[in-house]
């Protein structure tokens, strides 16, 4: 297993990793606190939460297995060379475990808080069912030949696919409501910061090793960052440009006194 060539780059790698972990981990709390304060989950898309739970669960399986399993690491080195470093860091495992926990908490909030007329769609339930059925089939195929690295690549593919589809329901819901009220933008800002730091971490490791196998060996982590940046930027655009809630509230607040003045003038004329 390869070691770091540069101490400063190794430190930068660790700092970026734990910064990404902090941003991504903290990003779950604004939505949880918002739900608690409002005692409502209206405005939060339930499909997004369910798909997100599946995504983070598959990512946890990949990260934990790659980081802790010597059998998986052996197959990785045989595939990419013993001079390479494994593409998963401790912060990746910590984030995945925390993400599964907090997403499960959010899903529990959906069960106990006011949710209006919204419910899980059959499409989302169908996607999750097919994904886990596919994962089970892949497990039994891998079990026969002990192809654990191949199995993890399947879970990595699943998490990339789920990352692609999980944001879509919330984006469509915001568009239909012409509002992002009930959906925490703080979550998105932190999510974006974590994605950028996560990508930077991969770049630093590749520069130190003089090899881009880090990207090829963990294409899921790369796509995770890029897709997250795209959708988070889109959500920020929805919140601040397309559906700016604060401006709407101000305009409503300013309209009310004007109406009161008109009613007062009318009563005086009468």
Image: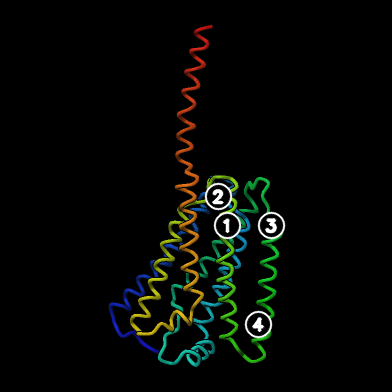
User: What is the distance, in whole Å, between disc 2 and disc 4 at their CAs?
Assistant: 37 Å
Foreground mark, 4 or 1, reads 4
Sequence-earlier tag: 3 or 1: 1
Query: Could you say where residue 95 lies in the image, as x and y percent from the top left?
Result: 48, 69
Residue 101 in the figure: left or right of residue 121: left
Q: Is residue 66 above or below residue 267?
A: below
User: What is the distance, in whole Å, between disc 4 and disc 3 at their CAs?
Assistant: 28 Å
Residue 120 in the figure: left or right of residue 185: right
Query: On the image, numbered disc 4 is attached to which residue?
Result: 139
Query: On the image, numbered disc 2 is attached to which residue?
Result: 35
Q: Secondary structure at mark 1?
A: helix
Query: On the image, numbered disc 3 is attached to which residue?
Result: 121
Crowd band around label 2 with a 10 angstrom C-alpha radius: few (<14), some (14–19), many (20+): many
**Along the viewing direction, whichever of 149 and 92 lies nearer the viewer:** 149
Residue 246 in the figure: left or right of residue 163: left
User: What is the distance, in whole Å, between disc 3 and disc 1 at their CAs?
Assistant: 17 Å
Q: Secondary structure at mark 2?
A: helix
Label 2–label 1 contact, CB within 8 A: yes
Foreground mark, 4 or 3, reads 3
Crowd band around label 3 with a 10 angstrom C-alpha radius: few (<14), some (14–19), many (20+): few
**Along the viewing direction, whichever of 263 and 3 lies nearer the viewer:** 263
Query: On the image, numbered disc 1 is attached to which residue?
Result: 106
Q: Is residue 146 above or below residue 221?
A: below
Sequence-earlier tag: 2 or 3: 2
Residue for point 36% across, 87% down: 3
Query: Could you say where residue 62 lies in the image, as x and y percent from the top left?
Result: 54, 77
Q: Secondary structure at mark 4?
A: helix
**Along the viewing direction, whichever of 25 and 132 lies nearer the viewer:** 132
């Amino acid at each position: 297993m390869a070691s770091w060539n540069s101490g400063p780059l190794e430190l930068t790698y660790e700092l970026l990793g734990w910064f990404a972990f902090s941003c991504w981990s903290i990003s779950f709390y604004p939505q949880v606190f918002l739900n608690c304060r409002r005692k409502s989950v209206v405005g939060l898309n339930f499909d997004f939460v369910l798909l997100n739970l599946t995504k983070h669960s598959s990512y946890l399986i990949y990260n934990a297995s790659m980081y802790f399993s010597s059998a998986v690491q052996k197959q990785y080195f045989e595939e990419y060379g013993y001079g390479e470093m494994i593409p998963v860091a401790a912060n990746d495992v910590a984030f995945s475990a925390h993400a599964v926990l907090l997403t499960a908490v959010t899903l529990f909030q959906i069960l106990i808080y006011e949710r209006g007329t919204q419910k899980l769609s059959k499409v989302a339930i169908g996607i999750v069912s097919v994904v886990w059925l596919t994962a089970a089939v892949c497990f039994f195929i891998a079990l026969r030949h002990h192809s654990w690295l191949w199995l993890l690549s399947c879970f990595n593919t699943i998490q990339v696919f789920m990352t692609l589809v999980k944001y879509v329901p919330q984006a469509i819901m915001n568009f239909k409501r012409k509002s992002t009220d009930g959906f925490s933008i703080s979550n998105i800002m932190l999510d974006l910061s974590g994605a950028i730091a996560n990508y930077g971490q991969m770049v630093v490791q590749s520069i130190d090793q003089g090899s881009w196998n880090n990207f090829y060996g963990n294409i899921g982590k790369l796509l995770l960052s890029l897709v997250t940046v795209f959708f988070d930027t889109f959500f920020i655009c929805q919140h601040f440009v397309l559906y700016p809630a604060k401006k709407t509230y101000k305009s409503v607040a300013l309209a009310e006194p004007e109406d009161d003045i008109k009613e007062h003038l009318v009563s005086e004329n009468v």
